Amino acid sequence: MIPIQHSFKTRILFVTGSVLILIMMLISITILFQWRTILIKKEIHNAQSVANAFVVPALDAMIYAEQRELLKGDLLETYIDNFMQKVTDIKYIQIFDENFNIIAEKDAVFSNDNNSLNKADNIRLDNIQTNIYKSTKHGWVLETYTHLVIGDKRWGTTKIGFDAKPVRNEIKEIFFALLGLTVIISLVTLSVLFLLVNKITYSLNTLVNQIDKIDFNTNEGINLTASKDEIGFMFERFNDLLKRLHRSKDQLSIAQKQVYQSEKLASIGRLASGIAHEINNPLNGIKSCIYAIQKNPTNNEQINEYLLLINEGVTYIDNVIKKLLGFVRQQPHKINFQNLNELILNVYRLLEYKLKQKNADVQLQLSEDIPLIKADAQLIQEVIMNLLINSYDAILQNGRIIISTGFYTNDTVFFSITDNGPGIAKTEIEKLFDPFYTTKDPGKGTGLGLWVSLNIIENHNGKILVKSTPNTETVFTVILPIEVFNENIIS
Amino acid sequence: MFGLEFVSEMNKHIKNIFSDMRKKHFIIIISAFLLSIFATVLFYEYVVDISTVIYPEVNVVEKTNHLKKPVYYVGVISRYPPNIIFNGYQPIIDYLNQNNKFHFELKLSTSYSETVDQLINGNISIAFFGSLLYINAHKQYGIVPILKPLNEDYKPFFSSILFTSTNSGINSIKDITGKKIALPSQESFSGNWLIKYELKKVGISEKDIVEIKNFPYHQNVIFQVTHGNYDVGVVKDKVFRDYKNRDLKIVAYSEPVPGSPIVAAKNYDPEVIKIIKSLLLKIDLSRPYYQELVKNWDEEFIYGFVEANDSDYNLIRKYSGTN
């Protein structure tokens, strides 16, 4: 399984999701600030409108009071009371005269808990401002100043504090609405993205599963429902690739067969002198018998004796030829239960004469306890032949070859061929199974023997181990499972 | 069943995430989540902190040079409500204050006679008067005219207008028999013209009128007629123009009489009068500066002034029978 941090799905979801959430956040923040600015401006505008509405009659009242020589403050405070009863958003009102002396007020803030100008001494014409601040008495307040002016004559100034809590609540609502919207849209989009990515990765996983199920021993394609999108296109191309692979494999199999056969023939070539000698001896005997019969054709007793010898010689030759043909002939490969010891003996017998040429001390240490194995006899014999010829080539005159069999594990058996030849250097061992690699003189080896042997054994789900101690001994151990799972070793 | 499959797929995916997730990734994700919550809270606090300071685009700059100048008060007869007087006359005072020697302030009164008293008592130096009030005050207290305003034809006259509602059947002075009449102050020309001169001309006596009532301000007369409380009314032509879009029609108007003068007490300060005259006689509406200057002035004075002489008001004297 692919780790989550490397998963295609996770990466797409993470990258796209992050970008999406970021964009949504930017949009939401922009909208929020736009709304916030608009709401605050609107609130200030409304406050200033109300303040202006208050100023006109307040100014009239001041003029009226002056004309009638009434007390301005009393008149204005009455007016402030009435106004505040009607406009409930107002928290406090102060009216200053032209010298910024307070002449009328209601609920004004006198604490120094804010930057508000709440003392007449602090007010100057050049620092009058509209501001929003948090007051300990009234909470959030929007404070606005308006001058009572006609022409160049300033009669005074009003300071009105409005309740700013509603606008703050509106901003809060917008904040939570946008936050909710951002979360919901992000979740919905991520879910949709998840489904889409899931669909794509599902198709890819299906392809991967089908790839895992591909059996190169059959020519079956993969079973995928191709859609009309890019994934479907990929499936089609993959099926085409698979067909080409099958074709290549068939061609490779044919070539491999030819190589096997060539290698086999090469082995036979190397046996030829031994075979010739093996046939030559009985032939000389037959020739001597025939000569003796021709010399004395009337001696029936001798003739009968020689005919028996001739028959024995011909039978011997027939056996040699049969063994040879049996090894060379291309027969259909079959998996059957085989006795490994018997297969070894068959090959040994074929090479016995050749081994005797070097007066080799061949020791057969075959375990009688090993079970039958499921294998292709011809191919296993070919492997034994290759390894035994290699050992033969390796040993000197009077050299020693030990052939042994036995259990390797509970489920596997082995056969090993040990010789006391010069051994193989460590660096050489790594290359032993490469095709066309040989240490023999030109014409004496094709360099394919061990490569073919390894292929055969691997196709039987087995393996070949090599252990060599230079100038002491070399051991080739072939391990084979008792049951061979691959029914078609070479198709 | 799509929903169940989706939930099951999600569960599987989440399980995969947690089973695959290394401790390092888990810590990173949890940290990022906590950090985003912290950032959201901070951002929330920032957003809901609506503390704002907005400086006004144009600051009011108090002109303080007047503090060093002697103050002279300018009176206005109570022909209009005080706020209207301030709105229309304060800009004229602001203009007069452009001089370097004196500072002028408006001083209102509650009646025409109070303005006369203020002038005699020296509480005010000059005053915006009515024509009829002037001839009486001149006769009694020697008050002198300084300037008189020009009308839209640049003539120093005005007219009083008899008006009624557009849908009224009154089309001439003869039609007002048996009607109710609203008039401005008895001390104004408009408050006397119709009753004392025009009705006599057409042979209507006061007995033929159901009701005649004087109101403090010209605007009161307009509102009384538009509200239907009175059938006809008389106001200065300037006031009628201000309200002519209120379904009003002219029934008759007086011949042009000399405009309401700016007057001074007999013992006026010639330096003050000189400055006032020099400033107000300079007004020339053909020049953009003055067009802009008079924009907020009472319409009666926007066309400028000419010097006034007592003899200019003989026509009024003829109407009132005063010598």
Image (cartoon, coloured by chain):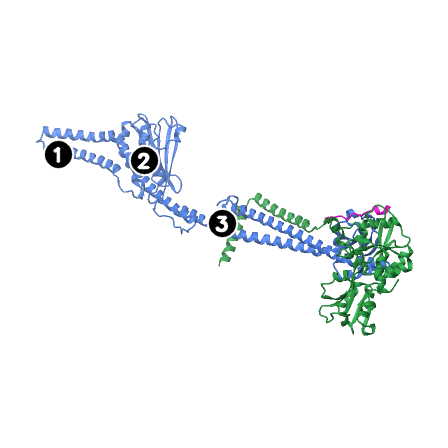
The residue positioned 58% from the left and 50% from the top of the image is A24
Can residue A38 be seen from the camera position used here? yes
Q: Secondary structure under badge 3?
A: helix
Vertical comparison of B146 with A320: above or below: below
Give how far apart the Cα atoms at labels 3 and 1 are.
93 Å
Left or right position of A236 against A331:
right
Q: In which image quadrant can residue B220 be found? A: bottom right
Task: Say what amino acid the circle numbered 3 marks.
Answer: Val
- Of helix, strand and loop, which mostly describes the magenta segment? loop
Q: Are marks 2 and 3 on the same chain?
A: yes
Q: In which image quadrant can residue A422 be found? A: top left
Query: Residue A160's x, y, as percent?
Result: 77, 55
Going from N to C along the chain, the mark reached first, 3 or 1, is 3
Give how far apart the Cα atoms at labels 2 and 3 are.
55 Å
Query: Residue A76's x, y, as percent?
Result: 82, 58
The residue positioned 26% from the left and 37% from the top of the image is A327
Q: Are marks 3 and 1 on the same chain?
A: yes
Task: Say what amino acid the circle numbered 2 marks.
Answer: Ile
The quarter of the picture where the C terminus of chain A appears is top left
Looking at the rendered structure, the number of numbered marks drawn on it comes to: 3
Q: Nearer the viewer, mark 2 or mark 3?
A: 3
- For label 2, the residue is A384
Residue with the most extreme left position: A298
Query: Residue B317's x, y, as percent?
Result: 86, 62
Going from N to C along the chain, the mark reached first, 1 or 2, is 1
Q: Chain of mark 1?
A: A
- For label 3, the residue is A197
Chain B's shade in the image? Answer: green
Chain A's shade in the image? Answer: blue
The part of the chain drawn in magenta is B57-68
Q: Secondary structure under badge 2?
A: helix
Instruction: Check residue A304 in the rendering and tell me which mark sits there, or answer none.
Output: 1
